Structure formats: C-alpha cells, structure tokens
Image: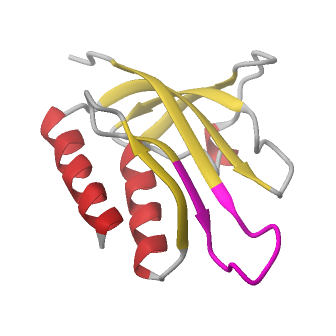
C-alpha cells in the first residue's frame, strides 16, 4: 500500500512535467546476462527509444533489440504490475525534481533464487523537439 501510494504520487509528478523527449542513463540488473548490468544512455521520444549507447563501450544498441531498456512510463507500469502481483519490493526510490524511479529492486518469488530484477535510472535531461 505504501509503495503504491509513493508510485502514484511520483507518477503524477512525472506526468505533470509533460516531458515528451528526454535522455536518461539507465541500467537493468538481473541474473540473465546479455546487455543487463550495464549502463546505457537512452534517448526517448514519446516513450519510444530512438537511440541507445553503452556508456562503457560507446557501442550503439539497436532500439528493436533493447527489450530491457524502459521509458520512465514503462518502468512505472512494470513496477506497479509487480506490486499488484504481490512481489516483494526490496528498494524503491524516486527523483525529487521529476518524479521518475531512480532505483527499483523486485523479488518476484522469495522462495526461488536469482529471480530478482532491478533498474537504476539517473541523469535525466529533457530535450526540446519543437
């Protein structure tokens, strides 16, 4: 209940900003290999990835294959779904200025090992597109 209230309050703050395009640095963390556990600088326009770059190697990521890179709105939705399914929230924090999730860590099944997933988002910069 507490986390759902926090999520709703910060989601409203984010939506009130009316940001259509932005750059954000994010990392998806899991026990799944691949592009996980690496920071990407990601450019979004209307919740769609237009550009993603690995911050360590400067390698570009094909937006079509960037399935674990989420927009701010998508991460709100994924986190809310996890809460409604009764998953354990290990950590949840928000950006004070914009309201986006800065860190979320979820354990879908406490009885199973290595099912946890997490996101870290930082350095959001709105981009003017008009």
Q: Position of residue 62 (x, y in %)?
A: 69, 36
Colouring: secondary structure
Specify the quadrant that holds the C terminus: top left
Task: Determine whether 104 is above or below 108 in the image.
Answer: above
Task: Determine whether 73 is above or below 114 in the image.
Answer: above
Q: Which quadrant of the structure image shows residue 3?
A: bottom left
| 100 displayed left or right of 31 | left
Q: How many marks?
A: 0
Q: Position of residue 10 (x, y in %)?
A: 25, 47
Q: Camera-side residue: 110 or 16?
A: 110
- The residue at the point 24 percent across, 40 percent down is 14
Q: Camera-side residue: 37 or 63?
A: 37
Q: Residue pushed farthest left?
A: 16
- The residue at the point 28 percent across, 39 percent down is 99
- The residue at the point 30 percent across, 57 percent down is 7
Q: Which quadrant of the structure image shows residue 76?
A: bottom left
| 7 displayed left or right of 48 | left
Q: Position of residue 96 (x, y in %)?
A: 28, 31
Specify the quadrant that holds the N terminus: bottom left
Q: Position of residue 129 (x, y in %)?
A: 27, 18
Q: Camera-side residue: 130 or 127?
A: 127
Is 112 within the magenta? Answer: yes
- The residue at the point 43 percent across, 32 percent down is 44
Is 105 within the magenta? Answer: yes
Q: Main secondary structure of the magenta part?
A: loop
Q: Which residues are magenta?
A: 104-117
Q: Camera-side residue: 53 or 76?
A: 76
Task: Determine whether 109 is above or below 65 in the image.
Answer: below
């Amino acid at each position: 209940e507490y986390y759902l209230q926090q999520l709703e309050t910060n989601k409203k703050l984010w939506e009130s900003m009316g940001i259509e395009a932005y750059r954000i640095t994010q990392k998806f963390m899991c026990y799944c290999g691949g592009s996980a556990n690496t920071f990407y600088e990601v450019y979004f326009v209307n919740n769609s990835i237009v550009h993603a770059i690995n911050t360590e190697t400067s390698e570009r990521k094909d937006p079509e294959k960037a399935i674990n890179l989420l927009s701010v709105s998508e991460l709100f939705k994924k986190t809310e779904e996890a809460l409604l399914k009764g998953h354990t929230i290990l950590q949840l924090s928000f950006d004070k200025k914009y309201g986006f999730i800065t860190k979320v860590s979820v354990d879908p099944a406490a009885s199973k090992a290595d099912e946890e997933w997490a996101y870290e988002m930082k350095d959001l910069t709105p981009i003017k597109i008009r």
